[in-house]
Image (cartoon, grey):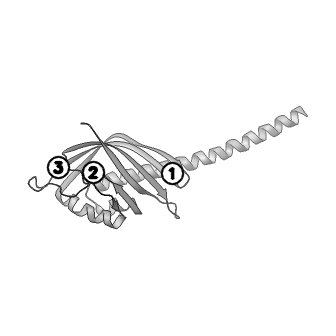
Amino acid sequence: MGIRRGWVLTGLLLVASLNGGTVLAETRADVEAIDGLYASWRKAVESADIPGYVAVLDENVRLLPPGAEPIVGAANYAKFLEPVFATADYRIEVVRSPVIEVFGDVALAEYEYVIHLKLKNPEVGVQQPGALTAERTAARYVDVLRRDASGRWAVYRHAWQDQPN
């Protein structure tokens, strides 16, 4: 009886560990996909690629900039970016890469960047409410991402808090 229970317990532990391994592998794949999303997003920012930037956004994204009204929807976000990228070039310094937690079809990402801005025409500057305007902005970001029916991850909420320089 004791040996049989031992085998049953071993079998249950093996099944549980295999299922846990599957969950871990799926989570790892999700984190890798989301890391790829952030790499694409940084590249789009630095090359002023609006379609590439918007490609990582959920159709119903909400940009929640400090001190400005939210920008709602990917189409409105694209319109917001036109004058932003027309007036400045951006370089991203990664202070802390995204730390990603996955909860089913929702994920949370926290990260820190320093955004370096170079004005194309210093006399005009960036005029868009909600856009970064300083030559150097250190910020802590938090995003909510969600997975769509096709399995694609996209940024659903994007917010940040400026950090002292």
- Comparing 140 with 68, the one in front is 68
Helix, strand or loop under label 3 = strand
First in residue order: circle 1 vs circle 3: 1
Q: What residue would you read off at disc 2?
A: 67
Q: How many labels does the image show?
A: 3
Inter-mark Cα distance, 2 to 3: 22 Å
Towards the viewer: 89 or 76: 76
Q: In which quarter of the image is the C terminus?
A: top left
Quadrant of the image occupied by residue 15: top right
Where is residue 59, by image quadrant? Answer: bottom left
Residue type at the position of mark 3: Lys
Q: From the image, state whether disc 2 or disc 3 is nearer to you.
A: 2
Name the residue that disc number 3 marks: 118
* x 37%, y 53%: residue: 158
* Image quadrant in which the N terminus is located: top right
Q: Where 96 sits versus 77, above or below?
A: above
Residue at the limit of the structure toward the left, as seen here: 123
Q: Name the residue under label 1.
A: 30
Q: Where is residue 101 in the image (x, y as percent from the top left)?
A: 50, 45
Looking at the picture, does residue 28 appear above or below residue 44? above
Q: What residue type is labelled 1?
A: Asp
Secondary structure under tag 1 reads: helix
Residue that appears at 34% across and 47% down: 160
Residue count near mark 1 (Cα–Cα under 10 Å), binned few <14, some 14–19, many ≥20: many
Q: Where is residue 65 in the image (x, y as percent from the top left)?
A: 31, 52
Residue 84 lies, in percent from the top left, at: 22, 58
Q: Which residue lies furthest to the bottom in this view?
A: 75
Whether residues under marks 2 and 1 lie with C-beta atoms below 8 angstroms apart, the answer is no
Residue at image position (33%, 67%) is 75
